[in-house]
Amino acid sequence: MHKRWTRRRLQVLIFTFLIVLFVDLQLRTSDPPKLSVVLDPPAGALQRAIKGAFSAAKDALRPASGSSREAGHPATEGAPVTQPTLRQEDIFIAVKTTGRFHKTRLALLVETWISRTKAHTFIFTDVEDEDTSSEGYNVVVTDCQSDHSQQALSCKMSAEYDGFMSSDKRWFCHVDDDNYLNPEALVSLLSSFPQEGDIYVGKPSLDKPITAHELLEGNATREVRFWFATGGAGFCLSRSLAEKMAPWASGSRFEQTSATIRLPDDCTVGFIVEKRLGVSMVHCPLFHSHLENLLLVNHRSIAHQVTLSYGMFENKMNSIEVKGSFTKEDDPSRFKTVHCLLYPFTSWCP
Ligand code: UDP
Ligand code: MN
């Protein structure tokens, strides 16, 4: 009798143990969904970028030694503070354009990716665009000249920076009007950085730092070398870093800084970040300009690229190679084809 009772108890005990084991295993194997998006990308480029981003993020948290940068301790020092998840609308997207490109370039962007980022995208231009603003897009008409001069372009970048600073957004991203921007890929990339860190991320167009001759007082010059993210591929700045840039970037100061090194707007951003603040740029392969051979962008990784571009090179169209809904005649930039791959339910996608 007693023996039977003991055996029953033993069976119940073993059964309970197995249930506990099973529940524990289930809990261990289910990943938090956000993390799996970031850490499980099929594209090698993304993996490298995220890895680079993580190490840069660690660097960004370390105070830069031997530089003018103030100790870059984030607000998270001491007890760990959990950051709210980054949302698309936390990113201020600035698009640089000019009157003569409204119909030829801007319209394509508005039709494709800007239609999905309308509320937090700001189009910086030099003449009104009634058609676009009447549809509720944010068109900022600057007083900048409408040419390709260093001064005119710095004037627009300065307006973009000031626009961001007076917003409540957490990140500033700049693109040209010949860039396709994938908002989901952008959020994934920026989420991988510490949100309170000093981050400047983009892709250089040169294979080594640029050399500038900084104008000093009394007409003397000093040679300076620094990396910069090419504006034609797009780049981003975290709010913490953008705030530290203010003494050289806010109001009329951006154009003054640009004149000091006699280089365009994107170089000026690199100069302020790397030379004035001692913060290193994060080199990221997910940004693309038409200064690189766009045929080399792997078609299987297109959905993970943050920006794409197109343009003429030696009288031939330089664009990404992607098969899909539109022919090269109907879609020479390939932006419509990419958009229909990413958002197949768009009304005009076949
Ligand atoms: N741009 C401008 N004013 C001009 C010419 C160009 O604001 O007179 C802008 C243009 O809209 C684009 C960026 O500057 O966003 C770069 O121009 P583009 O692509 O023509 O030249 P790139 O420098 O890429 O060769
Ligand atoms: Mn261009």
Image (cartoon, rainbow, N blue to C red):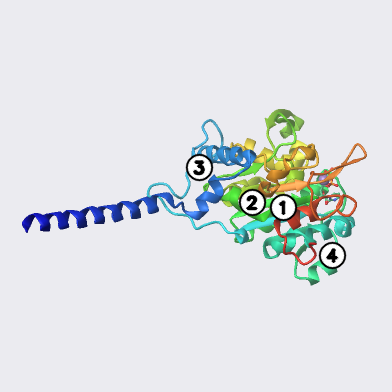
Q: Between tags 2 and 4, which lies in front?
A: 2
Which residue was labeled with disc 2?
Answer: 186
Query: Which numbered marker is on residue 72?
Result: 3
Residue 267 position, x and y percent, is 73, 39
Within-10-Å neighbours for mark 3: few <14, some 14–19, many 20+: some
Q: Nearer the viewer, mark 1 or mark 4?
A: 1
Q: Mark 4 vs mark 3: which is more N-terminal?
A: 3
Q: Quadrant of the C terminus?
A: bottom right
Nearer to the camera, 341 or 178 = 341
| Residue type, numbered disc 3 | Gly
Residue 264 locus on image (x, y percent): 78, 41
The residue beneath circle 4 is 128
Which of discs 3 and 2 lies nearer the camera? The answer is: 2
SS at circle 2: helix
Q: Mark 4 Cα within 10 Å, few/some/many (few <14, many 20+)?
A: some
Left or right position of 140 against 64: right
